[in-house]
Amino acid sequence: MINKFQKNVIGTVLRACCMQPLTGFTRNGICELHPEDRGLHTVCIVATDSFLSFSTSVGNDLSTPFPDYQFPGLKPGDKWCLCALRWKEAYDAGCAPHIVLSATHESMLDIVSLDVLKQFAIDS
């Protein structure tokens, strides 16, 4: 799936992050910039044990399902559209998960440099 209107951090068309589990602020699989998304769920991550434990420790349990929000709960290896500032917080704590550059919105470059993001990329 391709979003033809928004770009990723490498300057190409923003690609889908994940359809299973279905992610994105509007649950369309895309980490797009959305005007109602105050959390900026624009970073396509690949969850790890370390990151999930860190996130829970700072008050954001991403492992427990919340069906009311169409949230299945994440396990290591799942891709997910994460809040940009949560990724930065994990990075600062040494627990940042890997990311998919082609599915991470270009607005992330306002928070972290492309050089830093490339260090965590599973694509190039």
Image: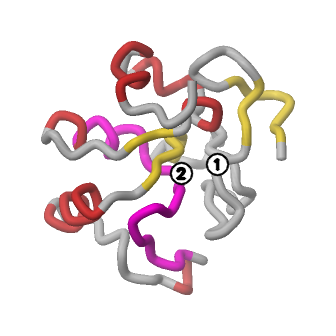
- The local crowd at label 2, few if under 14, some if 14 to 19, many if 20 or more residues have their Cα within 10 Å, is many
Q: Of the residues shown, which amino acid type is indicated by label 1?
A: Cys
Residue 81 vertical position relative to residue 66 in the rendered view, above or below: above
In the rendered image, the quadrant that contains the C terminus is: top right
Residue 64 vertical position relative to residue 124 in the rendered view, above or below: below
Q: Which one is closest to the eye, mark 1 or mark 2?
A: 1
Q: Residue at x 83, y 47 (%)?
A: 1
Judging from the image, what secondary structure is the residue with disc 1 in? loop
Q: Of the residues shown, which amino acid type is indicated by label 2?
A: Cys
Quarter residue 27 falls in: bottom right
Whichever of labels 1 and 2 marks the residue nearer the N terminus, that label is 1
Q: Is residue 124 within the magenta segment?
A: no
Q: Which mark is residue 71?
A: none
The answer to whether the residues at label 1 and label 2 have Cβ atoms under 8 Å apart is yes
Residue 31 vertical position relative to residue 55 in the rendered view, above or below: above
In this image, 106 relative to 76: left or right? right
Q: Residue at x 70, y 24 (%)?
A: 7
Query: Colour mode?
Result: secondary structure
Q: Is residue 86 within the magenta segment?
A: yes
Distance from disc 1 to disc 2, alpha carbons, whole Å, reads 7 Å
- The local crowd at label 1, few if under 14, some if 14 to 19, many if 20 or more residues have their Cα within 10 Å, is many
Count of all numbered marks drawn on residues in the image: 2
User: Which portion, as a residue range, is magenta?
Assistant: 71-89
Q: Which mark is residue 81?
A: 2
Q: Residue at x 43, y 18 (%)?
A: 110
Q: Position of residue 107 (x, y in %)?
A: 53, 25
Judging from the image, what secondary structure is the residue with disc 2 in? strand
Q: Residue at x 41, y 71 (%)?
A: 75
In this image, 94 relative to 30: left or right? left
Q: Which mark is residue 17?
A: 1
